[in-house]
Structures are given as C-alpha cells and as structure tokens.
Amino acid sequence: MHKYYIVSLFGILFNLSAASAITRDSIGVENNKGKKLIVHQVVAKDTYYSIARRYDVLPKDIMAFNDSKFLQIGVIVKVPTNIPFTTAAPANVAPVKGGNTPVTNSDANLTEHVVQKKENLNMLAERYGTTVNEIKRLNNLPNNNLQIGQLLKVPEKEANQQIEQVPEPPTTAEPKVKATPIGEKPKKAEPVEVKSNGDFIEHTVASNETVYSIATTYKMTMDQLKAKNNLTDNSLHVGQKLLIKGQYPTKKTFTPSQDPQTHPDTLNSIKTPALRYPASKYGLNQIDEKGTALWIDDPNLESSKMYVLHRSAPVGTVMKITNPMTNRSTFAKVIGKFTENESTKDVIIVMSKAVADALGALDKRFFCNLTYGGQDNE
C-alpha cells in the first residue's frame, strides 16, 4: 500500500515538473488578429521542431512567422496559434501608484508587449498611439526604466487608430508647423531648376542629386548624360549646369564696323580695340573652335613633341588648346592633316601624348577649345 502511494506521488511530481518545463520559457502572449501569439524565450538545446512540439503547432508556421531567425539562448521567438485570444483576470489586483484605480488584465482593448533591445517608453507610446504616463499607469511603473524581455500591458493599436479616425470639425486656424527636433537643422526643399525651350533642356544640379538620379529622371543612361556634358567621372556640385537635350548656341564673333567715317584712320583709332578695317587686313584674324580631341601613339607623330594634326589649319600654325574640364591650356604646332576614318569622324584635332599630358586629359577622347590665327584669301 505504501508503495502505491509512493508511485502515485512520484507521478504527480513528474507531471508538475513537465508542466513547468512546458511553460517556463513562455514569457507572455500577444493578440495576433484575435488569435493567441505565444512569446517564447529560447533556452539551451531549443530547436524549431522542439518548440513546435512544446506548443502543439507546426514547425514551418513558427519559422515563417519569425523569418527563420537563428536560434540562440535568450532570443525571443513568437509562436502563432489558432487559440482565441482572451485576457483572463488575475487572482490578485495590483493598485496603481498614486491612485485607487486597480490595474487588471481584463481592461478593455489591452494587449501585451515584450520589451525588445533598444526600446523605451517613448517608442512604445508612439507605436501604440498612447502616452508614456498611460503605459506607466497600466503597468505600475515607478520610473521610465525598462528591461529586455519585460512584459508590458499596452492599449491595442487598432482601438487607438479607430479613435484617431474620428473626423475633426473644420477650423479656420492657421496650420500647425511641424516642430523640428532639438539639434536638427530644418531641411529646406530646394526646387530643381530646369530650363526648357522646345528642343533645348538644361538642368541645374540640386543638393543630394547624382548622375544616376538625373539620368533616370530624363530617361537617359549615365553614359549618355556624361557624354552629353563631357563628364569624366560621376562627381557633381550644387548649381552645376547639365545639358539634357539640344545644343548650346554658338557665340557670334565680333565683327568691327567697316565704315571709315565711323572709325577714322588715326593714331588714336589704332590704340582702341575697334579698328577701321577687319582684323584679317592686318593678319590678325582669330579662329575659335570647340569639339572633341583625340590623342594617339603614332610613329609619325612623336609622343614627346608638342605636335597636332588639324583638318584645315595650315602646316606651321601654332594653336592654343584649352581643356575646360581641368582649366589647363597649352600651345602646339600643326604638322599636317589627319585622315578621316571611324575613330576620327567626329574629331576636330588629333594630338600627341605630350600635348594631352600638358592639358591633364584623363581619356583619349575629351572636349577642348581651339584658338589660332588665320589669314583670309584675298
């Protein structure tokens, strides 16, 4: 008889220890669309399979709900169930500090939240649409300190959203200006300046804009935008002008008046910029060109000499060549003309490597300005 009692007592103790093992790692429950969501804290040797057996659910449901996160001791895992969510009233009621109103789990529209890493009362109040003092009142908190894994009672977000959706009566008061957090400078939205006139579009770079964002805006590729504006890299600065469509108008060269009565041929007139006759009369005619330059390694064009090839300039002409990207200029001598082929069909000048190095050219093809003197055939 005594043996029977001992066996029965041992069985009862075993069942109590098993029940305690089943629930010892469940640190709370949450409301998941009307269903109970068990909050489980991982202990040693826990797997998705063992957790699923513990709470009588499918392992794949737990893995899908938690994005198959890596399990290690202390990690919080949420177990979805089909059990209806109900908040049972506890046996004992805790009074609220500073008042006589009791706090119970049977309060309407309450849910439970497990404190995660880097969470505080301000974040939770904003997330659930309530106040810090309300959360402190519901949980009888003496201060704002929280611990990871702490279980808090908070108002349900859905109920708070229904309250916020009540339409407010129309008012004629001025709209409130959103306050800027302390230490943060207010951001001004900078308008994007775009000049458009028919087939011509020019874009002014604003802050936070990149080559990729501008190219995407105008449905272009980055290479097209860079080639259109002779950009050697992706760097931009605020206020920079970018050509999107069309071409910039060519500057008209100044032609002095040929009326001898307007500019009499005197010594004083020679000292002034406006001469009586055109500059070509004095062999001072200046030609300006803009276009693509190409430097090559050619045995007939010594790479160490400042030599260039041009389509029409006479042999022996000294040209001033400027690279607008580096703002560097140099002088070179024309020693001949270059032949038309696939690589030079859109080129205005071919130069030696020494000239390209003096201009700071980064690529074999780059944009340049030419200035040289010529004589009219008379």
Image (cartoon, grey):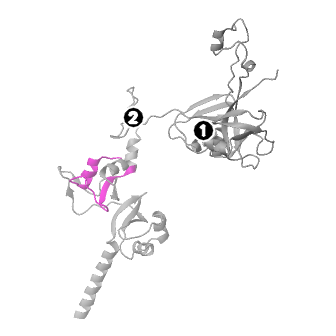
Residue at image mark 2? 168
Task: Say left or right for 25 vs 63.
Answer: left
For disc 1, the neighbor class at 10 Å (few under 14, some 14 to 19, many from 20) is: some
Q: Where is residue 362 in the image (x, y as percent from the top left)?
A: 62, 46
**Which secondary structure, mark 2?**
loop
For disc 2, the neighbor class at 10 Å (few under 14, some 14 to 19, many from 20) is: few
Q: Where is residue 198 in the image (x, y as percent from the top left)?
A: 68, 28
- Tell me the quarter of the image containing the N terminus: bottom left
Question: Is residue 371 among what the camera can see?
Answer: yes
Q: Which of marks 1 and 2 is in front?
A: 1
Q: Give 275 or 295, whichever is nearer the viewer.
A: 275
- Tell me the quarter of the image containing the C terminus: top right
Task: Say left or right for 113 vs 251.
Answer: left
Q: Give 286 or 369, whichever is nearer the viewer.
A: 286
Q: Which residue lies furthest to the right in this view?
A: 378
Could you tell me the amino acid type at mark 2?
Answer: Glu
- Segment tinted magenta in the rendering: 129-157
Question: Is residue 1 among what the camera can see?
Answer: no
Whether residue 146 is in magenta: the answer is yes
Could you tell me the amino acid type at mark 1?
Answer: Met
Question: From the viewer's perspective, is residue 143 above or below residue 282?
Answer: below
Mark 1 to mark 2 CA distance (whole Å):
59 Å
Q: Residue furthest front?
A: 267
Q: Of the two numbered discs 1 and 2 on the same chain, state the one appearing first in sequence.
A: 2
Q: Give 42 or 368, whichever is nearer the viewer.
A: 368
Q: Position of residue 19 (x, y in %)?
A: 32, 76
Q: Position of residue 127 (x, y in %)?
A: 37, 50
Picture residue at 26% right of the left edge, 92% below the top: 4
Residue at image mark 1? 325
